[in-house]
Image (spheres, rainbow, N blue to C red):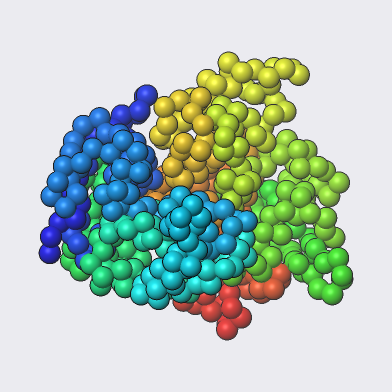
Amino acid sequence: MSVAVELRHISKRFPGVIANKDVSMSVETGTVHALVGENGAGKSTVMKILYGMQRPDGGEILVNGKAVHFKNPNDAIEASIGMVHQHFMLADNFTVLENIILGSEPKHGITIDFKAARKKVVEMAAQYGLEIDPDVLVEELGVGQRQRVEILKVLYRGARILIFDEPTAVLVPQEVDDLFNALQGLRAEGMAIIFISHKLDEVLRVADDVTVVRAGSTVAEVKSKDVTARQLAELMVGSELPQPTTHGDTRRPEVTLALKDVSIPTKSGSRDLISHVTFNLHAGEVIGIAGVEGNGQAELVEAIMGLREYTGAIEFSGQNMDRLSVANRRDLGIGLIPEDRQRQAMMMESPLWENRILGHQRGKPVMRGFVLDKKTTIADTRAIMAEFDVRAPGPQTLATALSGGNQQKFIVGREMSKAPSLLVASHPTRGVDVGAQGAIWEELRRAREKGMAILLISADLEELIGMSDRLLVMLRGAITLEIGDPTKTSPEQLGSAMTGAL
C-alpha cells in the first residue's frame, strides 16, 4: 500500500502551553488509522494542522509523498483531505442536498444545476452505503443521519483522506454499527481514514493501525491486532492503568443524607418518575446508583438538589431540606457534578475564573461581603487548576478551549474546593480518557477517607462496583435491589438486575 499522509515531527505552541512537540504518524491508503491519547494530549491540534485550520510551528506534512503547506481548510480540501467534526456544521433549514453542495454548487449557466448535483449525491450515497433522502430538511434528521450528511459533504468535495474527530461520541450503538459499516466501505474504496477516539474497544474493532500520543508526542505506532485495550491505555497514560477501587471501611455513624419515601409523580398522575425511594447515606460512604438511563436517576438527583418537587422527605445531617432552595442546599455543604458538563456545569464561552463562580457565588473566596472578589477568585481558580491538573494556560482561558477531560477535572476541583459534606456525582468520568478517569477516582477516594458522603450515579458498571461501598439498583423509578458488598457481584449480574432479569 502507498502512504497517503505522513506527519513528521509536528510541533505547535500556544501561549503558556505546548500542544504538540513531536507528533509523527504514517497513514496508508485503504486503511483505518486510529489516533488515540488522553484528553489534552494533542490529538485534535495535530488534526487541525493537517486540515489547515492551524499552522504548525515545526515539522513537515506529506500528502501522497509530496510536501504541503496548508494556509486554510480550502488548501486541505484541494489536496483531497476532508474532516468530519464531532460537532456537526450543518444548516438546519437547508435540505440534505443543499447542505452537501453548499459552497461547491455545480452551475448550469448562472444557476445551480440541482439535477446534476442530485444525481451525483444519490450515486455517491449508494456507492458508500450512506443512503439518505436528499430532499429532507436537516432539522428533521437524527444524529446518525446528520453524520451521514457530514460524510457525504466531504466526499462530494473529492476527499480521499478523511479525518473523523470522535465520531461515535453522540451515536447510539446501532448508529455506531452503521458508521463502522460505512468506514469499511470507504476503506474498501481505497480511502485513508484517520479515526480519533478515546473509546479503545471501538478503536480495536475498526482500526488497522493505531498511533498513540502522550503529552504532545508520539509514543507508539502499532497494529491493532497486536495489542489489547489495556495495553493501549497504559501507553496513553505512561503507567499501569488506574483501577476504580476503594480500600478499607471509612463509613462513619452519622447519616449525611436521608431519603424517606421520596416520590415524584408525573403531571398526569399516571405513574411516578421516582417511587417511594428510601435510603440513608453515611459520612465516609459511597453509595452507587445503578440503572439503565431513564429509570429515575436524573430525577433523583434533581430532587436531592431541590430542582424537582417531590413528596416524602429529604434530610441533610438531620435537617429537613424540603422547603430549601437549590442555593440554600448548596450552602449547607452539598456539591454537585452534573451529568452534562457543558449544558449544566459550565459557561463555555466564559473564562475559567468566571466558571469558578458557578454554584459558589454566595460566599468566600468568590465574594467579599456583597462584592465579587475578582482577584481572589482568579487566584483560587489558579490553585484549583494546579491541584487538579487542569491543563490550560491560565484562569483567563475560555472553557470551550479545554479538552473534555480538563473541563471535567475543573468541575470536580470546583466542587471539591469547599470540601462539601455531600457530593452528588452524576457520571463523573463520562466522556473522559483513562488518565482523567484515574485522577477523578483518586479525588473521590481521598474525599471518602476524609468523611465525605458520596452519591455516585454512573453507567460504567466497573466504576460503580469498584468505587461503591453499597449499590442500589433503580428500575422504573424504584429501588429494586440493594447490594451490600459490591465486590461480590459482577458487571453481568449487575446488568441483569438493572433490566429486571434478577
Residue 456 seen by the camera: no
Q: Quadrant of residue 3?
A: bottom left
Q: Quadrant of the C terminus?
A: bottom right
Residue at the image position 41 percent from the left and 27 percent from the top: 393
- Locate residue 263 relative to residue 215 in the image: left or right: right
Rendered location of residue 46, percent (x, y) = 30, 42
| Residue ranking furthest to the front | 109
**Residue 389 or residue 63, whichever sits in front:** 63
Rendered location of residue 424, percent (x, y) = 62, 49
Rendered location of residue 485, percent (x, y) = 52, 67
- Locate residue 190 relative to residue 146 in the image: left or right: left
**Is 132 above or below relative to 59?**
below
Residue at the image position 58 percent from the left and 18 percent from the top: 376
Q: Quadrant of the N terminus?
A: bottom left
Residue 54 seen by the camera: yes
- Locate residue 374 relative to residue 250 in the image: left or right: right
Residue at the image position 80 percent from the left and 64 percent from the top: 263
Rendered location of residue 381, percent (x, y) = 53, 26
